[in-house]
Amino acid sequence: MILVLDFGGQYNQLIARRVRENNVYCEVHTALDIEKIRSFKPEGIILTGGPQSVYKEDSLLPPIEIFNLGIPILGICYGAQAMAKILGGEVNPASVSEYGKTEVEIVGASKLFANVEKKSVAWMSHTDRIFSAPEGFIVTASTKNCPIAAMEDGTKNFYAVQFHPEVVHTIEGMKIFSNFVDICGCKRDWKMSSFVVDTIAKLKKKIGGGKVLCALSGGVDSSVAAVLLSKAVGKNLTCVFVDHGLLRKNEAAEVEAVFKNFDLNFIKIDAGERFLNKLRGVIEPERKRKIIGEEFIRVFEEVSKKIGAVDYLVQGTIYPDVIESGLGKSAVIKSHHNVGGLPDFVDFKEIVEPLRLLFKDEVREAGRELGLPENLVNRQPFPGPGLGIRIIGEVTAEKVKIVQDADAIYREEIFKAGIKNLSQYFAALTNMRSVGVMGDGRTYDYAIALRAVLTSDFMTAEAAQISWEVLNVVANRIVNEVKGVNRVLYDCTSKPPATIEFE
């Protein structure tokens, strides 16, 4: 395995993803001491980016002892600067910061850059830079404003890059990770089938004869988590599906129909009125997420008391949920209801998250390994807080119906048009009301925003270019069939700077 030491950057989970794409197991950990690092017995270590400056007193740095382990180390952005500082180089604020796509030129022979184009585009995001390399290092790449864009000590297998090879905008990024995997001597034999077998074994050992309650939404993440637990603990698992009144149109009935065909203890709870009452008057997005997260937990606690002595609560948390909710010193982008949205007190022995270190496409692959049907594995992603975060401002029953109806029309027309390459698409209700005209009369109604994205990992995404013909049909149907809407907008923003969901 390769160990990733996390210093709080927003792209850090992508590093693990790129390593796994080379069929090498990888874990991400923050602030480990040297003994813990040794216990992993890694073939290599990657130091990630982060928002700090290495020359400040409170900056988090890797333990100096890692450079005596005799294994390859790759520093990325902040990680490169940390390597430089610890080993005797100089890091200072740059006179010109670099953000976004930048041309990088390879200027020296390097195993890390084997078969990499001499000039290519890479993604930069830094305000500090390395001004002098440590003794024994040579400069291997540069940019117009960053003379030391990469450096290495090939004898000791220490490598550092100022840019981010993990993001898709770095054209040669995958070659760089593949080269590092080769430098580490990894066998490239880790596959999703290994993860499934190992996870079931670990769950059996951890839970034993304990009772387990699984929070089942019907989405791919919680469904895969439920089947994993079912294979590990059998009838000691109870799956609870909470209809919080914020689901897509007809979704509660569809989920119930699907899971009644599985050999699971399945319980459906109707709690729509309860959640709407809790959300009355609330407009701030983070507060909405936390209210929904806490109310989910309270429902699960009540169910566990009825079925008796439940030890573990299982959630389908995946890695993007964790990183966006704030991992280590990472920024909180949005609190996911099953991570940062959890209340301080949870009346369970432990929360179990078997998918916590997987990305969305890896979860789908695990689902296939477990024998889940393709229509469930490829189900459209849907956030736990549901339409509560697709309604800007206060959530009311009237607004829920508006967005349900608009979203149903959008999904129906996408299906009719045979568009199958979209990673995620949905309708959201803005808090904007505007003047319109219908039947020669004035209206003052809401605007619906349509969103569709293309992504492989849901950490970065591009807005999909849906044909105008399809969008025109969707817009006409929504304004004619959905009461309270007189305007339809299409969101053309990528992630970043936007997120995929609206709140």
Image (cartoon, rainbow, N blue to C red):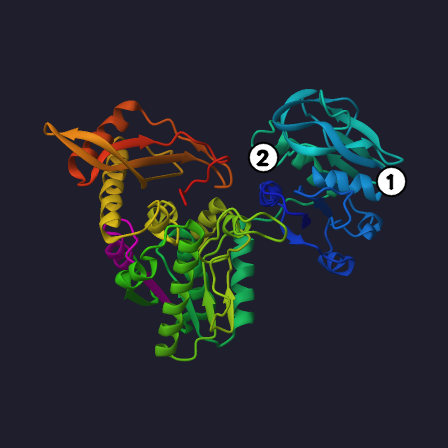
- Residue ID at (62%, 47%): 189
Q: Is residue 157 visible?
A: no
Q: For residue 10, which quarter of the picture?
A: top right
The residue wearing badge 1 is: 88
- Residue ID at (72%, 23%): 145
Q: Residues within 10 Å of mark 2 (few under 14, many from 20)?
A: many
Q: Is residue 169 left or right of residue 272?
A: right
Q: Is residue 36 left or right of residue 231?
A: right
Disc marking residue 63: none
Residue 224 x, y percent position in the rendering: 43, 56
Viewer-nearest residue: 108 or 436: 436
Magenta-highlighted residues: 239-257
- Residue ID at (74%, 38%): 80
Residue type at the position of mark 1:
Gly
Counting residues from the start of the chain, the first of labels 1 and 2 encountered is: 1
- Residue ID at (10%, 27%): 440
Residue type at the position of mark 2:
Val
Placement of 436 over or under 214, stated as above or below: above
The residue wearing badge 2 is: 167
Viewer-nearest residue: 489 or 147: 489
Residue 70 x, y percent position in the rendering: 83, 48
Query: Per the image, is 78 magenta?
Result: no
